[in-house]
Image (spheres, rainbow, N blue to C red):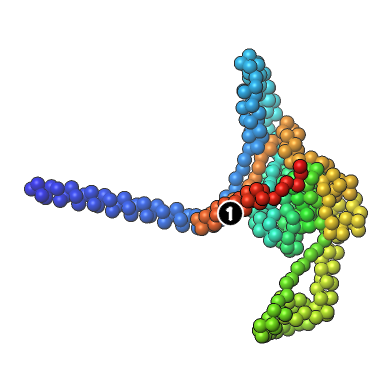
């Protein structure tokens, strides 16, 4: 009997363990399946509240107990008056009236402007709720890249203008080439004093390995249908006709770029600024490439009392391998930067 009792107890424990393991596996599979179907999610951050909380924390360290008590009393009085006004304005009205909103978007563009995927989601979300009394504020950083990719990014910003919603773009570091193509769509461009602005030009660089292949007796064949299906090639022998056609295509793209910038900023002397050069923020102001010298931080602080500031960010779901790869790349980049800073003398002394 004792043996049967112990065996039964062991069997119960084993069954319980198996059931627990199966339940965990089912939960993991369900979670993985859910993540696969989920492309991303929209995050909305109340920047107004964040700034006010930061201010409050600093004040608590700087003010005396008596001053804090007096300020708390005053803040409570102001809040009560605001609530009273809101209640009065809402009385007898079925319309939901919100205070003016300042929607903040960050765009840090790569060469292929892959960030436009998130940008279009963010803009779509904002346009679903924004009114003409609101404003969209884009913190833009980009040195440019592929023409078609940045053309799409600029078109996404144009959607905001088409809805008659004010659009302001801030450049703290760089908005060059395709980056400036995006920036010029705005109603107003602000830039930090040493930000890099402009570079209204087009560039293409193609290495050619034809001589190297010939040296090693490697033949390369390329078949096309259409005279200009391929103008320049990396492995074949290029000719003057192909070069001229390629240069013609670059010039046509440049003319389209110039026309786009002129259309959105007619005050510019387009022939003067469309040389492919770039300028620092203060120089760009003199050339009318930007409208004001100011950092994004100061702009947000200036609007804190007039508008409710919220940041809208679309985060794409990433697989574990992508997250791990990004973490490794970030670590390597950080190590290289540290090494460079250790071995290279400073520019400013």
Indicate left or right for 37 with 232 as reference. Answer: left
Indicate left or right for 92 with 238 as reference. Answer: left
Indicate left or right for 272 with 168 as reference. Answer: right
In the image, residue 36 lies at what x, y percent? 50, 58
* Numbered disc total: 1
Asked which secondary structure carries label 1, the reply is helix
Q: Toward the viewer: 247 or 138? A: 247
Q: Residue at x 60, y 48 (%)?
A: 42
List the single residue furthest toward the left. 1
Q: Is residue 73 above or below residue 38?
A: above
In the image, residue 139 lies at what x, y percent? 72, 46
Q: Toward the viewer: 326 or 75? A: 326
In the image, residue 83 lies at what x, y percent? 65, 25
Q: Is residue 97 visible?
A: no
- Crowd around label 1: few <14 · some 14–19 · many ≥20 (10 Å): few
Indicate left or right for 276 with 309 as reference. Answer: right
Q: Residue at x 58, y 54 (%)?
A: 332
Q: Residue at x 89, y 49 (%)?
A: 287
Q: Which residue is identified by label 1?
A: 332
Quadrant containing the C terminus in the rendered view: top right
Q: Is residue 58 visible?
A: yes
In the image, residue 50 lies at what x, y percent? 63, 34
Q: Residue at x 65, y 24 (%)?
A: 59
């Amino acid at each position: 009997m004792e043996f049967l009792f112990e065996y039964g107890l062991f069997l119960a424990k084993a069954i319980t363990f198996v059931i627990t393991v199966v339940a965990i596996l089912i939960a993991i599979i369900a979670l993985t399946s859910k993540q696969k179907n989920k492309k991303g999610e929209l995050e909305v951050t109340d920047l107004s509240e964040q700034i006010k909380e930061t201010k409050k924390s600093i004040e608590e360290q700087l003010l005396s107990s008596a001053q804090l008590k007096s300020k708390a009393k005053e803040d409570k009085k102001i809040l009560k008056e605001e609530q009273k006004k809101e209640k009065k304005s809402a009385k007898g009205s079925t319309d939901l009236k919100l205070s003016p909103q300042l929607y903040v978007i960050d765009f840090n563009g790569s060469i292929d402007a892959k960030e436009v995927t998130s940008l279009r989601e963010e803009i779509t979300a904002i346009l679903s709720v924004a009114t003409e009394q609101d404003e969209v504020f884009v913190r833009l950083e980009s040195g440019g890249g592929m023409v078609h990719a940045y053309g799409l990014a600029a078109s996404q910003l144009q959607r905001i203008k088409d809805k008659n919603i004010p659009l302001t773009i801030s450049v703290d570091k760089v908005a060059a080439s395709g980056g400036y193509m995006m920036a010029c769509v705005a109603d107003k461009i602000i830039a930090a004093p040493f930000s890099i602005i402009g570079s209204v030009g087009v560039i293409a660089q193609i290495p050619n390995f034809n001589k190297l292949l010939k040296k090693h007796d490697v033949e390369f064949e390329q078949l096309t249908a259409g005279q200009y299906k391929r103008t320049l090639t990396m492995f074949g022998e290029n000719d003057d006709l192909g070069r001229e056609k390629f240069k013609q295509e670059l010039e046509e793209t440049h003319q389209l770029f110039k026309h786009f910038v002129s259309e959105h900023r007619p005050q510019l002397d387009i022939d003067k600024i469309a040389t492919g050069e770039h300028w620092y923020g203060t120089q760009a102001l003199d050339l009318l490439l930007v409208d004001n010298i100011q950092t994004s931080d100061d702009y947000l602080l200036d609007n804190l009392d007039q508008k409710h500031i919220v940041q809208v960010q679309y985060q794409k779901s990433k697989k574990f391998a992508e997250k791990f790869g990004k973490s490794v790349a970030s670590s390597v980049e950080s190590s290289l930067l540290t090494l460079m800073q250790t071995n290279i003398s400073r520019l400013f002394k």
